[in-house]
Amino acid sequence: MLKVCHLYPDLLNLYGDRGNIIAFVQRCRWRGIPVEVLEVNIGEQVDFADVDFLFLGGGSDREQNLMAADLLKRKASLQQAIEEGLVVLAICGGYQMLGQYYLTHEGKQIPGLGILNLYTRAGQQRLIGNVIIEANINGQPVKMAGFENHSGQTFIGDLEPLGKVLSGFGNNGQDGYEGARYKNVFCSYLHGPLLPKNSKLTDLLISLALQRRGMDITLTPLNDDLENSAVEVIVKRYLK
């Protein structure tokens, strides 16, 4: 059985991010893969070593401040699990929190978990709109679509990006990259939510989670016509 952990579902569910959990679980169940979902809120216990897939969503500044102190208490166990292959999807604020720090307009550094070698600084304008990226999934170029709305500009240094921006802003509106990858950690600013439309990414996360659990990673093919059509509509609209 795969164990899925949704961290702070009551606080970090901006733009329907809970849909990422729904898509992951449903694509498992369609294949007969048993899944258990743990919803972990502030102060509640979780053993990351026993989790296969962890989701950390986005929230408003107020909500992120509420969970930041709690998340810092979990840093050591989370970092160890990540090094041991925990599959993580972190969106927007969750993405930023995994980095070194957030630099405010006033020049104040708000520390992050420091698990990933990236940082975020406050931008002068919000980066809003539909996004199309090209990602490498299992050695194949795949177009993915989502929606971004963030003022933070994230710089990932030597980390591998999730994808190359074809339309939209991405991490910072400057370097042409969106998101970041480290081991089995996938970070992105793409809401929408991300996984329901982008089935190839969802299946990659499922395969990695199965591998972590020591289960067969061969996935039964599903009919993804609807998901592919949703992305194609955005691609045709924004890529001339």
Image (cartoon, rainbow, N blue to C red):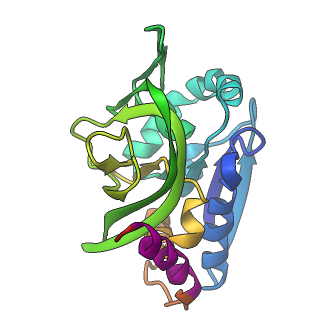
Q: Is 51 left or right of 181, judged from the image as shown?
A: right
Front one among 188 and 171: 171
Can you tell which quarter of the image residue 41 is in?
top right
Residue farthest to the right?
A: 10
Q: Which residues are magenta?
A: 226-238
Q: Is 124 left or right of 9, judged from the image as shown?
A: left
Q: Is 160 left or right of 216, judged from the image as shown?
A: left
Residue farthest to the left?
A: 158
Rendered-image quadrant of the N terminus: bottom right
Q: Is 198 left or right of 28, judged from the image as shown?
A: left
Q: Position of residue 9 (x, y in %)?
A: 73, 45
Q: Position of residue 148 (x, y in %)?
A: 52, 49
Is 118 magenta? The answer is no
Whether 218 is drawn above or below 47: the answer is: below
Rendered-image quadrant of the C terminus: bottom left
Whether 103 is drawn above or below 201: the answer is: above
Can the viewer see residue 208 in this picture? no
The residue located at (50%, 81%) in the rendering is 228
Q: Position of residue 59 (x, y in %)?
A: 66, 37
